[in-house]
Image (spheres, rainbow, N blue to C red):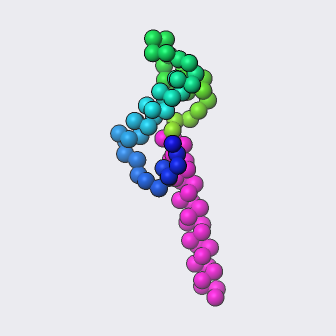
Amino acid sequence: MLYGSEYSAISKVDGRRLDALDQWCLRRLLGITWYQFVSNAEVWRTSGQPLLTSTIQAQRLCLGALRDWMTVLLLNILLLQ
């Protein structure tokens, strides 16, 4: 689900949809049915998983920092030649 997500912008609506899908998947994995009335916060606390959108955001920040570091490194190499 996360493959390639660090390269595209995610709108607020799409982010909510991704989190809703993630919530649905977690409920299925944990065996929680719709009539048990378990809150979303309780599902995330039980699963120990962060929000999917926060994971994507962290990956994008990490990738951006790596890209900036590589750009500086390449510029230094080119300038020293």
Secondary structure that dominates the magenta span: helix
Residue 21 pos. (x, y %):
45, 32
**Residue extending furthest top?**
35
The residue shown at (58%, 78%) is 75
The residue shown at (49%, 33%) is 22
Q: Depth check: 75 or 35 in front?
A: 35
- Which residues make up the magenta segment? 53-81
Residue 29 pos. (x, y %):
57, 25
The residue shown at (51%, 38%) is 52
Residue 10 pos. (x, y %):
40, 47
Specify the quadrant of the image occupied by residue 79: bottom right
- Tell how many labels: 0
Q: Depth check: 24 or 76 in front?
A: 24
Tell me if residue 61 is in the magenta stretch.
yes
Vertical placement of residue 32 versus 65, above or below: above
Q: Depth check: 19 or 54 in front?
A: 19
Vertical placement of residue 54 versus 8, above or below: above
Vertical placement of residue 66 versus 44, above or below: below
Residue 12 vs residue 42: left or right? left
Residue 60 vs residue 14: left or right? right
Tell me if residue 78 is in the magenta stretch.
yes
Looking at the rendered image, the quarter that the C terminus falls into is bottom right
Residue 45 visible (yes or no): no
Residue 19 visible (yes or no): yes
Residue 55 pos. (x, y %):
54, 43
Vertical placement of residue 67 versus 72, above or below: above
